């Protein structure tokens, strides 16, 4: 003999608290298990884009510092 949640709690009409809880749990489960692939893809696309921009900015700053150091070194060597 199989028992459903409704049989276990003695629920038979849609206005009883047990049915409302059961329906709410079904709705929450549907929200929890919905496919969020597109949302996740968009989120990570934005996150990765920002991370790459940050990395590029740090790289450009370090490159500029190195360029200035080499130029200063070169100018000192050429003058002496």
Image (cartoon, rainbow, N blue to C red):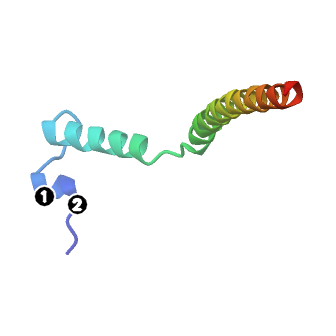
Q: Mark 1 points at which residue?
A: 8
Q: Left or right? Give the position of 16 relative to 66.
A: left
What is the quadrant of residue 22 in the picture? Answer: top left
> As rendered, which of 44 and 16 lies closer to the eye?
44
Residue 64 percent coordinates (x, y): 74, 27
Residue 40 percent coordinates (x, y): 56, 41
Local packing at callout 2 (Cα closer than 10 Å; few below 14, some 14-19, many 20+) is few
> As rendered, which of 6 and 13 lies closer to the eye?
6
Question: What residue do we see at 48% from left, 45% from top?
Answer: 34
Local packing at callout 1 (Cα closer than 10 Å; few below 14, some 14-19, many 20+) is few
Question: What residue do we see at 15% from left, 36% from top?
Answer: 16
Q: Name the residue under label 2.
A: 4
> Mark 1–mark 2 contact, CB under 8 Å?
yes
Spatial CA span between label 1 and label 2: 6 Å
* Residue 34 visible (yes or no): yes
Location of the N terminus (image quadrant): bottom left
> As rendered, which of 35 and 27 lies closer to the eye?
35
Q: Which mark is drawn over residue 70?
A: none
Q: Left or right? Give the position of 19 relative to 51.
A: left
Dot 1 falls on a residue whose secondary structure is helix
Location of the C terminus (image quadrant): top right
């Amino acid at each position: 003999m199989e028992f459903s949640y409704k049989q276990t709690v003695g629920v038979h009409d849609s206005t009883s608290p047990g049915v409302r809880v059961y329906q709410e749990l079904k709705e929450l489960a549907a929200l929890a298990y919905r496919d969020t692939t597109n949302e996740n893809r968009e989120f990570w696309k934005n996150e990765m884009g920002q991370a790459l921009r940050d990395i590029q900015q740090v790289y450009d700053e370090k490159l500029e510092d190195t360029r200035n150091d080499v130029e200063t070194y070169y100018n000192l060597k050429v003058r002496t």
